[in-house]
């Protein structure tokens, strides 16, 4: 990890966020295509908009692993504007997480967007909503937001959840029966975070009982989570 990514921000870069870890489906295909197209973007700022659990942070982290740079909460930029400008000037890029109504210091974001463009750097902003729903009042920032490329991520579909869970089990050296995964996917919340949590809890349950991962083990975990 480079020096800039170790600054004392509210970092949220996922250590395992790598391009090769991204699993594509109709829910995220456009976003992944934009990551692969970098730096051939129509502008220097890309907004990833989608619901909780749609994989915004994971995709943004995978981009940073390729493009180089840091990830920080958008709410942290006011207190760290000088450091962020130095990062941009050094050729690094930035991901700003969790933009939305009530989360934006408008003057700071306006100056940071300008700094990105001036440095020839790139920025991804993640949000649950589209920029026009952020209730921005600053006219110059409104103009910048209208010019930003926005890519929507959808709620994860069954195929994506299934493939993610199979991969997460494989990362734990567990060859999982796909019927067990199908059983989970039909009952779980539609979230990649939920998929990761379930895999960890199912693995722990199996280890505690000294048994293989099975539908019965998965059923107990789902029941404790109120999803069975």
Image (cartoon, rainbow, N blue to C red):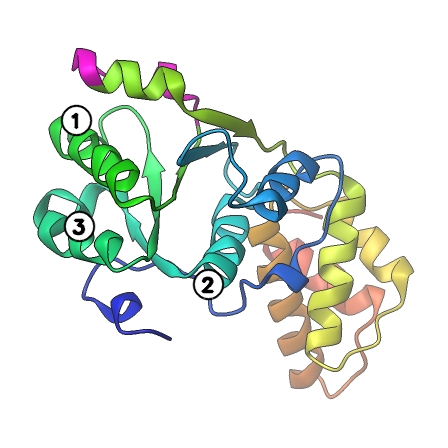
x, y (%) of residue 15? 47, 69
Which residue is at a point 59% across and 33% down the rendered structure image? 153
Residue 97 left/right relative to 61: left
Asked which quadrant contains residue 9, the reply is: bottom left
**In the image, residue 84 lies in the stretch drawn in magenta:** no
From mark 2 to mark 1, how far is it between C-alphas? 27 Å
Choose mark 3 or mark 1, whichever is in front: 3
Q: Residue furthest bottom?
A: 210
Choose mark 2 or mark 1, whichever is in front: 1
From mark 3 to mark 1, how far is it between C-alphas? 16 Å
Asked which quadrant contains residue 131, the reply is: top left
**In the image, residue 139 lies in the stretch drawn in magenta:** yes
Classify mark 1: helix, strand or loop.
helix
Residue 90, relative to residue 99: is it above or below?
A: below
Which residue is under mark 1? Answer: 106
Front-most of 200 and 54? 54
Which residue is at a point 74% across and 47% down the rendered structure image? 160
Classify mark 3: helix, strand or loop.
helix
Which residue is under mark 3? Answer: 85
Classify mark 2: helix, strand or loop.
loop
Give the mark nearer the N terminus: 2 vs 1: 2
Give the mark nearer the N terminus: 3 vs 1: 3
From mark 3 to mark 2, how far is it between C-alphas? 23 Å
Q: Which residues are magenta?
A: 129-140
Residue 145 left/right relative to 109: right
Residue 20, relative to residue 185: is it above or below?
A: below
Q: Which mark is residue 14?
A: 2
Disc 2 + disc 1, Cβ < 8 Å: no
């Amino acid at each position: 990890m480079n020096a800039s990514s170790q600054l004392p921000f509210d970092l949220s870069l996922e250590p395992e966020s790598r391009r090769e870890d991204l699993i594509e489906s109709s829910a995220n295909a456009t976003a992944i295509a934009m990551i692969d197209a970098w730096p051939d973007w129509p502008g220097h700022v890309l907004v990833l908009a989608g619901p909780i659990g749609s994989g915004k942070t994971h995709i943004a982290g995978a981009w940073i692993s390729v493009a180089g740079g840091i990830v920080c909460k958008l709410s942290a930029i006011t207190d760290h504007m000088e450091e962020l400008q130095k990062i941009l000037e050094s050729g690094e890029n930035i991901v700003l997480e969790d933009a939305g109504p009530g989360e934006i210091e408008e003057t700071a974001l306006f100056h940071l967007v300008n700094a990105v463009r001036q440095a020839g750097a790139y920025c991804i902003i993640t949000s649950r909503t589209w920029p026009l729903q952020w209730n921005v009042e600053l006219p110059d920032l409104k103009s910048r937001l209208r010019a930003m490329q926005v890519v929507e991520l959808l709620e994860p579909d069954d195929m994506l959840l299934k493939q993610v869970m199979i991969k997460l089990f494989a990362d734990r050296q567990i060859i999982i029966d796909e019927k067990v995964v199908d059983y989970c996917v039909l009952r779980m919340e539609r979230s990649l975070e939920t998929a990761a949590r379930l895999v960890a809890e199912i693995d722990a349950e199996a280890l505690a009982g000294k048994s293989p991962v099975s539908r019965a083990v998965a059923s107990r975990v789902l029941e404790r989570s109120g999803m069975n």
